[in-house]
Image: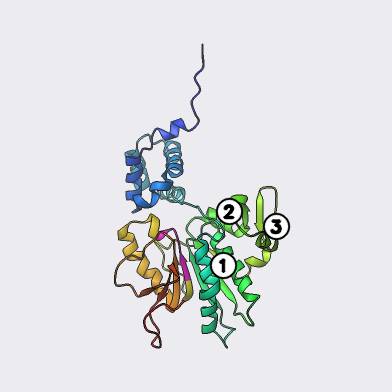
Amino acid sequence: MKIKFTHKNARTDSCMDDESFRKILQFFSLSWPGYRKVRKAVKKRLARHMLDCGCRKVGDYLLLLQEDPEATKKTRNLLTVSISRFFRDRRLWEVMGDCLIPKLLREVDGNCQRPLRVWSAGCSCGEEVYSLRILWDQVRKRSSAMPPLEVWATDANQGVLDRARMGAYPRSSVKGLPSLLLQEYFVPNSKGFIISDALKDGIHWMKHDFITELPPGITFDLIFLRNNLLTYYGQTLKAVVFPRILEALRPGGFLVIGGSEQIPGEQVPLRCCPKCECIFEKGFRPETDGTCNV
């Protein structure tokens, strides 16, 4: 008798087609276009969770999510997409180092005791946060005085926050990073690299869901909102959440979004930076002509 072996993922793949996946996204007010290119891995995670919960059909699964807060919380975490690397979108980081950070420093010139406050909203595994800390340190080396840098790094998924706080990354996360930066800011190990402890100063890791919670009670000079709200969430949620996040940015402060993302709405007090379409300045100073001069 010949034994027929079944691929280990066949059981889970068979109960999660695109139509079922769309229904789950709709349940959480998430965007199909945002998930379309990354859906394969997400569908596998959801299908496995469905079967673990004893649900063979997506309708049964959705009923469970309506009744079981723990299952809903688990599903939301499974929908998290953590695809990042250090200095993702190189042009953005070049403009930040050459123009944006120096501009922010000029604004606090003479008041170096006031910290420059940054919010990384949806920080995932921390590559963005540590990239900023590396860039800040590089700018510090050519500047006479630097204020303290305080970063609020928040995410709704405790698991990715724990990984970010540890600062351990596979080699794929640092792909393309100059060897000098690797030597200066990372410690190699058998699995990849560990971030230098010196870069962890001034970072406040915090579990926070910007969909259901108000922003941290602070006014920020710079907010990163990259590749999360504006990619993966539906228009209804964007219309509610985005203005709330924008309120946490001081006038004259800067918002940074993902390279393929767009600002929702038309009457938004933001001006796009001519040097990088990912950077936006909030409001306009009286002495300017209404353009972002980064």
Task: Give the residue at x 50% y 52%.
Answer: 83
Q: Residue 123, position in %: x, y?
A: 51, 61
Residue under numbered circle 1: 132
Q: Is residue 271 magenta?
A: no
- 155 w.r.t. 60: above or below: below
Residue under numbered circle 3: 187
* Identity, as a three-letter code, of the amino acid under mark 1: Leu
> 132 or 165, which lies in front?
132
Corner quadrant of residue 85 = bottom right
> 56 or 234, which lies in front?
234
Q: Residue 224, position in %: x, y?
A: 47, 66
Q: Is residue 228 magenta?
A: yes
- 113 w.r.t. 50: above or below: below
Q: Residue 176, position in %: x, y?
A: 59, 56
**Mark linked to residue 173:** 2
User: Going from the N terminus, do you reach mark 1 or mark 2 first?
Assistant: 1
Callout 2 secondary element: helix
Q: Which residues are magenta?
A: 223-229
Q: Residue 140, position in %: x, y?
A: 63, 75
Task: Give the residue at x 55% y 80%.
Answer: 105
Task: Give the residue at x 60% y 55%.
Answer: 174
User: Going from the N terminus, do you reach mark 2 or mark 3 first?
Assistant: 2
Callout 1 secondary element: helix
**Mark linked to residue 202:** none
